[in-house]
Amino acid sequence: MFWIIGVILFGVLCAGYLWRSNRNLPPGPWGVPIFGYLPWLNPTEPYKTLTALASKYGPIYSIQMGKHFAVVMSDPTLVRMALARNELADRTNFEVVNEIMQEHGLIFTHGPLWKEQRKFVCNWLKVIGVTKFGDKKNNLQLLIADAVSTTISKLRQSNNRPIDTGTFFLVHIGDFINLIVLGKAWPEDDPNWIYLRNLAEDGSKKFAIATPLSVLPILKIIPKYRNTVFEVIEGVKNTHLIYKTLMEKRGNEIHESDDLMAMFMKEMTKRKNDKDSHYFTEKQCCFLLSDLFGAGVETTVNTLRWFLLYMALNQEIQNDLQKLLDSACTDGGLIGLEQIESIPLLKACVSETMRLRPVAPSGIPRSVNTEITISGYRIPKGTMVLPLQWAMHHDEKYWTDPETFRPKRFLDDEGNMINHKAFMPFQAGKRACVGDTLSYWILYLFGANIIHNFNVSAEQGLSEKEINTIMDGEFGITLSPATHKVVFKSRI
Ligand code: HEM
């Protein structure tokens, strides 16, 4: 009996191998009908299974994930070259995402809509001050500094009580993102703001439940999945109602404002009688606003939380950083971006955090819009391409002792920051993150001033196992630390 099963399995594997090589597809593991390789993917840490497969099949391999044929890349040069190509400027068409986003917004759009809206958002970022220098940059820095000041006084009030950093930073970084996106920061207890924060906290869990649907849409017949999608759609509708009410309340004041909502409303008016097709509609405005809020908050909050955890677990590095911050801050005020330029160790700590715990460890997928050849392999139209950040960021070829938090690997002998080719938290090319510079500013300003003002430590009494669980993280929309608390003890 067993030898018959063995022969069948061997036959299936050979057939898979021949099928792949005949079609000149990248090598890869063979899966089962309908599910492909899904049954063997670690459901909580899929990026680790994908990384193990890269060691076996090489820097470019193919894998069937439910209904999607995917190519996984983990060689930095290959990834940069591939992501720069126009044929890879699209996102994968996931039915469940289309159902929720209705092909609006920016992150999941394609073609002319994506081009127009990305250009608009990049221009908006310049208008609010994401530039190399100038008054606008200073004003934007002041806005972030305001949020940092509030954060510091709230942390002082904690009186050494451990704080849940997830809920806490969602409020304070969220306030800043609301200001630039909606032109408004709500009081912490405003019902609308509480609703949006709950939605953001819940969103990651719902996303984790709904993820299998993106590769196996048939699962929607199961009530658990159907209900989750329904709840997400309800959340989107309610969020848009809040945005629309805000839009209605805004009058002439939008002409003096440069938040994203105001800029979009002005563009809508300007293009009212436009004969060319464009996408400046109220519906697009709502989806764009929620895209920018989502992309801006979840990523920076979780990176800051990881940074604080690494500081808490590496007290010597934290002390070194504090000495440098003390000497940079001579006037007792907040440390600004200019002073941070003279503290490369701070930047290196942030980069090392993003290397070890990238918020998108599996990479944000792209889709191939026209058949192409990469590394001699045929990549058919519609293939999902995963730039596997986890593999690149943990590869011994590029990083000595890759699992260790060692920020100095980002510094040269003179102490200047090094650009590592295998470091790609924002990915690269035509669709790379538009918020990279702004993210660094938020992380540097929050990170530097918190470490300057407080000794940061983990909650007392945690066992090694509990710390490992926190540091393994939870993978939803992003990779976040498992729920934990941190102690902030005033030092100045
Ligand atoms: C630590 C912070 C952040 C990380 C690690 C991060 C990472 C990423 C990654 C990996 C992508 C996919 C890029 C690609 O397909 O090549 C992306 C896309 C995007 N990010 Fe970020 N991001 C961060 C913060 C932000 C912020 C603060 C904003 C907005 C102000 C933002 C806005 C966007 C947008 C709009 C896209 C979609 C771009 C497109 O599809 O054209 N991100 N981000």
Image (tube, helix red, strand yellow):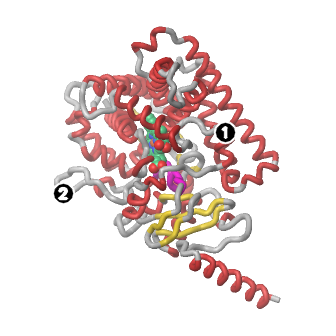
Q: CA distance from mark 2 to mark 1?
A: 50 Å
Q: To which quarter of the image does residue 80 belong?
A: bottom left
Span of residues in magenta: 357-368
Task: Say what secondary structure mark 2 lies in.
Answer: loop
**Residue at the (24%, 41%) spot, across then down:** 323
Tell which of 448 and 312 is nearer to you.
Answer: 448
Left or right: 184, with 319 as reference point: right
Q: Residues within 10 Å of mark 1 (few under 14, many from 20)?
A: some
| Residue 100 image label | 1
Could you tell me which quadrant the N terminus lies in?
bottom right
Tell which of 85 and 186 is nearer to you.
Answer: 85
Tell which of 35 and 176 is nearer to you.
Answer: 35
Q: Main secondary structure of the magenta part?
A: loop
**Residue at the (33%, 59%) spot, across then down:** 421
Could you tell me which quadrant the C terminus lies in?
top left
Left or right: 80, with 218 as reference point: left
Tell whether label 1 touches label 2 (CB within 8 Å): no
Q: To which quarter of the image does residue 423 belong?
A: bottom left
Check if residue 364 falls in the magenta segment.
yes
Tell which of 356 and 470 is nearer to you.
Answer: 356
143 relative to 212, above or below: above
The residue at label 2 has a CB less than 8 Å from ligand 1:
no
Question: Circle 2 is placed at which residue position?
Answer: 413
Whether residue 410 is visible, yes or no, is yes
Question: Residue 187, image x and y in percent?
Answer: 53, 17
Whether residue 487 is visible, yes or no, is no
138 relative to 353, above or below: above
Left or right: 476, with 144 as reference point: right
